[in-house]
Image (tube, rainbow, N blue to C red):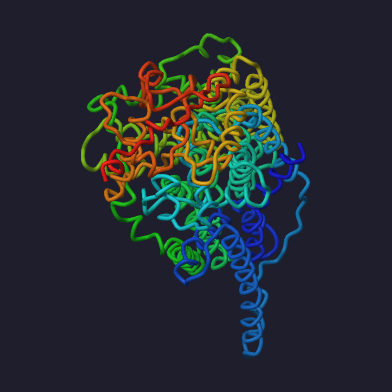
């Protein structure tokens, strides 16, 4: 219990701490609080800056060196932001007409009551984290196939003592070859830092980010963007909480991409920084922070940065473009551009080259716009609580649950009414979310129904995968539902006032408490429906099927840890049967690492690993490969009756495996079997012939 609490504290400190220090560069008051919402994104920006530039100047780039650099750079920026205005103030004071401008450097601090904001932030944050812990927090490791890929990268960061991408992204921990020369590693570096400092397992740290850091970042970012419009803290808190229940926040982990859940959580807070930068008054400082945070997101989950310009445009339109002053706007935009360039400059060439691309999923509904529109807009499963099951699953069991249907009907009513924010002035805070939903839903319909070069070129930014685009705007569904509920409440107030023959503009009090009351009812429906077993148990069961949830796995991995010598390697069927977690969490060397998608020169190194595997498991036809078995140091093979759901390659036949003279079973625990390589399996004919 104490170890888990320590890991949680360290994870939050590593994720928020350096960015929070950087927020001190902004003047006191409202701007600093807005910047604080982006602290996780700023931390990742500092990580990106450090891991990119430390090797360029010949300095160590391990996790501790990167963390020290983060804190040092943050402190330096704060110091410069404090000293430079004072020096400038003295010069202006010395000038004959400069005395009146000294106070303009720092905006006056307006004292406001913090308690309502603290409560309105704390409650959604607590509810979201507790609910996330109920779904994900009790597993042995994060669910999904790609979670193992991220775990392998994080373990390599610790083992190599380097955050350089070619060092980390390798075909395996033994005889490594470069599998990729570009990969967004900023989040992996922070996980490695937290694991190193806390002594916790990497899988535990990754899970803590999913259930603690990501929900906190999302709640803070949404709350800050909504409060920018002067919205009541209660409404802002409701908007911040809703995406925890409405939208694919948790279903994004079915495929196992932690950054696919965490990346979108950063976008609203970065949009807040951009809006604040171009509107002043701390244009330069906020522009630097916005550029740094944006660069951090690009090197965390690149395509999740795409909604930021749309969110920013919607917020600027709602706040009033005419109120922009060109000097602060140009200064803020220039600072943002320079800071972004400096942050990602070491990676920019590879980001813009073919090295950044992977295989692209072809469009699913070519020439069938109606079918695409049904998938993206009209399918009710898109709006069911927790976004589960996904629309493409073909399962509709939630539609047969009365309690779930009540929440679904209310949610759809709110979403349908959300465009009324274009009518009611006090709902202008809904513009950014409505514009983001409209733009990316339109892109989804177009790119999934058209195979034109332009459409597929744009879809290539997110590899053409539909669930990636849906997760990219996972926050928009919940926020728009709250916007629509408020709009329906205001519409009811307006209708009542007209029926009573009052003035068309309703009483001020009604326009405040009626939307608040309607939002309260809506949240009560969401929360009460979300906690009933019919809502969360199917999703949790599906997530559990994608983790090494059997109690045997930790025992087997511990057994391997105790029975392997330095250099001994354990082989498994890739990620399919969860064997990589033996290396990620227990340090047991495994045979296979990352697939060399962008490095053809490493293809032979990678394929040799599977040649050795095929020989050991007796896969027909398999050539004798004892030399490769010796070369990679394979001592054990691990198989399991449980595996990641999906059409992943099995890579062995159980009957052939049992008949193979190259392996002998030495340990069984539950569904997991450990096989030891025999002398025949290690026999190297080449060596014998010489």
Q: Disc count in the image?
A: 0
Q: Is residue 31 left or right of residue 608?
A: right
Residue at 58% x, 63% y is 65
Does residue 93 lie above or below 498 as drawn? below
| Coordinates of residue 87 in the picture (x, y in percent) | 64, 83
Query: Which is nearer the eye, 281 or 551?
Result: 551
Q: Is residue 487 left or right of residue 458?
A: right
Query: Which is nearer the eye, 562 or 109?
Result: 562
- Which image quarter is the N terminus in? top right
Residue at 58% x, 40% y is 586
Does residue 317 lie above or below 337 as drawn? above
| Coordinates of residue 460 in the picture (x, y in percent) | 31, 42
One can see residue 310 in this view: no
Residue 435 in which image quadrant: top left
Query: Which is nearer the eye, 95 or 594?
Result: 594
Does residue 377 lie above or below 593 as drawn? above
| Coordinates of residue 543 in the picture (x, y in percent) | 54, 25
| Coordinates of residue 372 in the picture (x, y in percent) | 32, 26
One can see residue 74 in this view: yes
Q: Is residue 473 left or right of residue 464?
A: right
Residue at 49% x, 23% y is 665
Residue 35 in which image quadrant: bottom right
């Amino acid at each position: 219990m104490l170890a888990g609490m320590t890991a949680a504290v360290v994870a939050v400190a590593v994720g928020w701490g350096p960015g929070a220090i950087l927020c001190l560069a902004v003047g006191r008051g409202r701007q600093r609080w807005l910047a604080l919402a982006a602290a996780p994104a700023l931390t990742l920006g500092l990580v990106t800056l450090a891991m990119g530039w430390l090797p360029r100047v010949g300095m160590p780039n391990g996790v501790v060196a990167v963390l020290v650099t983060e804190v040092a750079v943050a402190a330096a920026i704060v110091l410069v932001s404090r000293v430079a205005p004072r020096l400038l103030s003295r010069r202006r004071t010395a000038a004959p007409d400069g005395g009146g401008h000294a106070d303009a450097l720092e905006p006056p601090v307006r004292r406001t009551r913090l308690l309502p904001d603290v409560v309105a932030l704390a409650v959604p944050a607590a509810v979201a984290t507790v609910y996330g812990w109920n779904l994900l927090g009790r597993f042995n490791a994060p669910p999904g196939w790609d979670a193992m890929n991220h775990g392998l990268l994080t373990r390599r960061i610790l083992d190599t003592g380097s955050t350089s991408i070619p060092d980390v992204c390798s075909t395996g921990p033994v005889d490594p070859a470069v599998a990729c020369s570009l990969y967004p590693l900023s989040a992996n570096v922070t996980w490695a830092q937290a694991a190193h400092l806390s002594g916790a397992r990497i899988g535990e740290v990754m899970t803590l980010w999913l259930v603690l850091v990501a929900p906190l970042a999302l709640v803070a970012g949404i709350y800050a963007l909504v409060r920018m419009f002067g919205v009541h803290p209660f409404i802002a808190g409701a908007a911040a909480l809703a995406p925890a229940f409405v939208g694919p926040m948790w279903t994004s982990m079915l495929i196992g991409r932690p950054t696919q859940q965490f990346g979108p959580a950063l976008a609203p807070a970065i949009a807040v920084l951009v809006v604040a930068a171009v509107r002043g008054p701390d244009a330069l400082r906020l522009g630097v922070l916005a550029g740094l945070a944006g660069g951090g997101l690009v090197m965390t989950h690149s395509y999740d940065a795409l909604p930021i310009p749309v969110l920013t445009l919607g917020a600027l339109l709602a706040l009033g473009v005419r109120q922009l002053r060109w000097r602060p706007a140009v200064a803020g935009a220039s600072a943002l551009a320079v800071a972004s360039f400096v942050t990602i400059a070491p990676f920019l060439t590879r980001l813009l080259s073919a090295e950044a691309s992977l295989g692209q999923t072809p469009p699913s509904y070519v020439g069938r716009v109606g079918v695409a529109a049904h998938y993206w807009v009209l399918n009710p499963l898109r709006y069911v609580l927790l976004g589960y099951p996904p629309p493409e699953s073909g399962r509709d069991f939630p539609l047969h649950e009365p309690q779930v249907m009540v929440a679904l009907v209310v949610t759809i009513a709110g979403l349908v009414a959300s465009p009324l924010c274009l009518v009611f002035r006090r709902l202008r805070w809904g513009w950014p979310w409505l514009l983001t939903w409209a733009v990316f839903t339109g892109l989804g319909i177009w790119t999934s129904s058209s195979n034109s070069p332009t459409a597929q070129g744009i879809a290539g930014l997110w590899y053409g995968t539909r669930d990636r685009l849906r997760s990219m705007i996972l926050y928009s569904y919940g926020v728009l539902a709250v916007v629509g509920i408020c709009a329906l409440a205001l519409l009811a107030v307006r209708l009542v006032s007209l029926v009573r023959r009052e003035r068309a503009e309703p009483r001020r009090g009604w326009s405040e408490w009626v939307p608040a009351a309607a939002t309260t009812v809506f949240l009560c429906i969401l929360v009460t429906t979300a906690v009933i077993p019919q809502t969360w148990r199917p999703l949790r069961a599906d997530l559990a099927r994608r983790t090494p949830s059997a109690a045997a796995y930790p025992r087997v991995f511990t057994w391997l840890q105790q029975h392997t010598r330095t250099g001994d390697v354990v082989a498994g069927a890739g990620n399919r049967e969860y064997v990589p977690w033996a290396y990620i969490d227990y340090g047991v060397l495994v045979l296979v690492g990352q697939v060399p998608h962008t490095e053809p020169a490493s293809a032979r190194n990678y394929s040799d690993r599977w040649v050795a595997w095929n020989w050991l498991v007796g896969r027909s036809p398999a050539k004798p490969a004892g030399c490769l078995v010796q070369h990679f140091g394979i001592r054990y093979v691990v198989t399991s009756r449980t595996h990641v759901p999906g059409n992943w390659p099995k890579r062995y036949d159980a009957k052939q495996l049992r008949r193979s003279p190259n392996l002998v079973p030495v340990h069984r625990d539950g569904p997991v079997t450990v096989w030891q390589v025999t002398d025949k399996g290690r026999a190297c004919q080449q060596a014998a012939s010489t």
